[in-house]
Image (cartoon, helix red, strand yellow):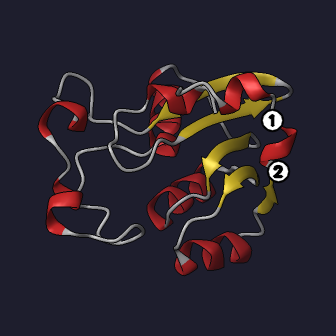
Amino acid sequence: MLAATRSTCLRRQVGAVIVKNKKVLATGYNGSPSGLRHCLDIGCLREELGIPSGQRHELCRAIHAEQNAIIQAATSGISIEGGILYSTTFPCILCAKMLINAGVKEIYVAQGYPDDLSRSMMDEAEVQVHYIELDNIPNNFKDAKK
């Protein structure tokens, strides 16, 4: 939840953390690539085009939180194979494929996402999915954006 507060997306703030052996390996949030203008500054193309959530991911300036966490680990030379992903939102199909190939076999998410193919591939890859009840998250994290 705390990583999501760094998001620069106008539509959905997502945060992700990859952990292994009780150690944080990488974090990520959704936002534009490094050095590029943020949607907060120039607006949202997906919103302007009326694209529903869960569709046409390629028409977005942002990199997803899970992707940013994977990239952060890779650029630091850290293997996330066998790691656990904690995310505010269930991964889309693009992120699911990356997580599967990176060897992540367990994820914890706070909310769903409208992507049936992602769910199907996670099942096929035997990735364990756990849903976190927001009632179990301390109030200081739930209210971090306020």
Residue closer to the observer: 69 or 1: 1
Residue closer to the observer: 130 or 98: 130
Q: CA distance from mark 1 to mark 2?
A: 7 Å
Quick check: marks 1 and 2 in contact, CB under 8 Å?
yes
Look at label 2 and name its amino acid: Glu
Residue at (34% x, 41% y) in the render: 9
Question: Is 108 on the left-hand or right-hand side of 14?
Answer: right
Look at label 1 and name its amino acid: Ile
The image position of residue 48, as x and y in percent, is 15, 60
Residue wearing tag 1: 137
Q: Secondary structure at mark 1?
A: loop
Question: Where, quadrant-wise, is the N terminus in this rendering?
Answer: top right
Query: Toward which corner of the image does residue 120 lie, by quadrant?
Result: bottom right
Residue 2 is labelled as none
Residue at (51% x, 42% y) in the render: 14
The image position of residue 142, as x and y in percent, is 68, 33
Q: Residue furthest front?
A: 146
